[in-house]
Image (tube, grey):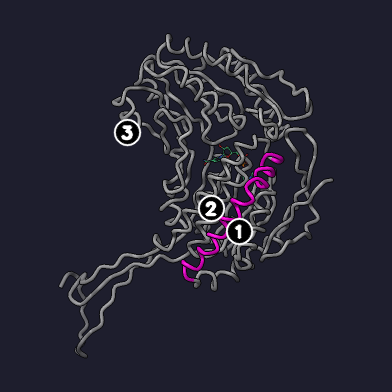
Amino acid sequence: MIYQVNHHINGLVINDSPKKLDITNPATGNVIGQVAMADNSVLEKAVASAKAAFPAWSATPPAKRVRILFELRALLEKNINELADLVTKEHGKTLTDARGSIQRGIDVVEFACGIPFLLKGTYAEDVATDIDSYTLRQPLGVCLGITPFNFPAMIPLWMFPMAIACGNTFILKPSERDPSCSFRIAELCVEAGLPKGVLNVVNGDKDAVNFLIKHPDVKAISFVGSTPIAEMIYQTGTAAGKRVQAFGGAKNHCVIMPDANIDQAADALVGAAYGSAGERCMAISVAVAVGDKLADELIKKLIPRVQGLNIGAGFKPETEMGPLISKQHLERVKNYVDLGVEEGAALVVDGRSFISPEHPQGFYLGGCLFDHVTPTMKIYKEEIFGPVLVVVRVPDFESALQLVNDHEFGNGTAIFTHDGGVARTFASKVQAGMIGINVPIPVPVAYQTFGGWKRSLFGGMHMHSTDGMQFYTKIKTVTERWPKDKKSNADFAMPTLK
Ligand code: NAD
């Protein structure tokens, strides 16, 4: 039976949107549900609900706010298997991968439970004679989160727990392709005791986004998705006077030095390039092989691993790689593989003809591996977001570093080496936000910050940790004096230390 995903506004399920979009199970190609597309009246309701909830929620002591987050954390852990099922059903990634990503989201809720400590201001006694000064951190108001399809639980959990812990209210607009997790999390928030209107989930596509990012009552926007949309949201949102952090696409390079353990590097590359069918913003999509000898050996090790990938539905325990999100995206990725061949790269593993025997209508692509890719090729320059790894050969470490730094994206990058000096230089000089040293997917933990450089992030603030707290609060500095006598005089000079 086809299910319906509605909006969750002011603690209630809102199901009066006539326009709907199909939700497809990418593993089978079957339509399994429909998601309501909010029109402007529904979006207005969500903003009004978040605005009305703000005064009481922002006045609730932080320690009381986080009691609800402690409860939410427990409920998320209790329901992790149900949430993982929803992720696998609508996104296609394997259940273990889905569970891991939800756990990463729960880690942020856990971090947000400590917000009372972070919201404490600083106090300076005697900044001048009988004058003290202190700071306050206060919430912004209604915050908006717009999330991509590839982490339907984790990325919403990067955003709203930090925002509401800081005293804001929140509107979440999840990806229309896999919206069920966000709706279920909103239900769990109600069960945890979150007051009505503090978290509102509205479903929709670009029309909903375009309405919300210009709404005068929205004070801040967190966006994660592709670079063109991230850039548009940053420009539109900041032009409308809002605080914006907009996370974009990636092309993450992994440099393999000749002294690296080649088996470890090959295993790491296969997991990082083909896990989640390459649909991770931290996936490795470029292997930079230093020296031809190493490159030849690496290709030899990679070919059987890529050919041997166990591809199938994410629910099957033996599956290593599931389908792509949609038929359209599958075609797009296949077109990139065709293009790579036309551009003259060597396609050493061709997964284009893979068809799942169990689910021939599913959106599967076999792993693809290109050798002899050059920096001018489109398959090198553009984000493919699929199970396609390109190998670029360079003569030395300096050329590898230059290659990474010249790319327009700078989300994550990694190096495999046993030379501590080389690794240190790489970490210091490379132009990217998240660096792995013998770690292929260096996704920072919740108490570190997550974020890229260059065209992978528009706006200054990273996600979660102290950056998350700073993004969702404004700082206020109070200078105070309590005069002992009644004497007064006007002073026209700039106040200085007295
Ligand atoms: P997307 O940009 O298509 O969609 C993201 C969100 O924007 C969705 O909620 C969607 O409804 C909305 N949207 C789509 N088109 C829009 C438009 N024209 N105007 C306004 N809103 C629009 O991204 P996606 O395909 O869902 O996700 C994949 C992308 O996200 C990849 O590029 C990936 O690298 C990126 N991503 C980045 C990070 C990061 O941390 N930098 C993390 C995850 C994913």
Q: Residue furthest right?
A: 1
Q: Is residue 205 left or right of residue 243?
A: right
Q: What residue appears at the point 58 percent right and 14 percent down from the top-left corner?
A: 304
Query: Residue most toward the bottom?
Result: 486
To which residue does mark 2 refer?
Answer: 159
Q: Quadrant of the C terminus?
A: bottom left
Q: Position of residue 50 (x, y in %)?
A: 60, 65
Would you call the spot at circle 3 few (<14 residues within 10 Å), some (14-19), or many (20 or more)?
few
Secondary structure category for the residue under label 2 = helix
**Alpha carbons under labels 1 and 2: distance apart:** 10 Å
Of the residues under marks 2 and 3, which one precedes in the sequence? 2
Amino acid under disc 1 = Ile
Nearer mark to the viewer, of 1 and 2: 2
Q: Answer whether residue 74 is magenta in the image.
A: yes
Helix, strand or loop status at disc 3 = helix
**297 and 485: which is toward the camera:** 297
Mark 2 and mark 3: Cα distance apart in space: 29 Å
* Magenta segment boundaries in residue numbering: 61-90
Quick one: 258 or 96, which is closer to the camera?
96
Location of mark 3 (residue): 428
Which secondary structure is most common in the magenta stretch?
A: helix
At mark 1, the secondary structure is strand
Q: Quick check: marks 2 and 3 in contact, CB under 8 Å?
A: no
- The answer to whether 412 is drawn above or below residue 68 in the figure is above
Disc 2 residue type (three-letter):
Met
How far separated are the C-alphas under marks 1 and 3?
38 Å
Q: Which mark is residue 171?
A: 1
Q: Amino acid at mark 3?
A: Ser
Q: Position of residue 159 (x, y in %)?
A: 53, 52
Q: Tell me if 4 is positioned left or right of 346 in this view.
A: right
Labels 1 and 3 touching (C-beta < 8 A)? no
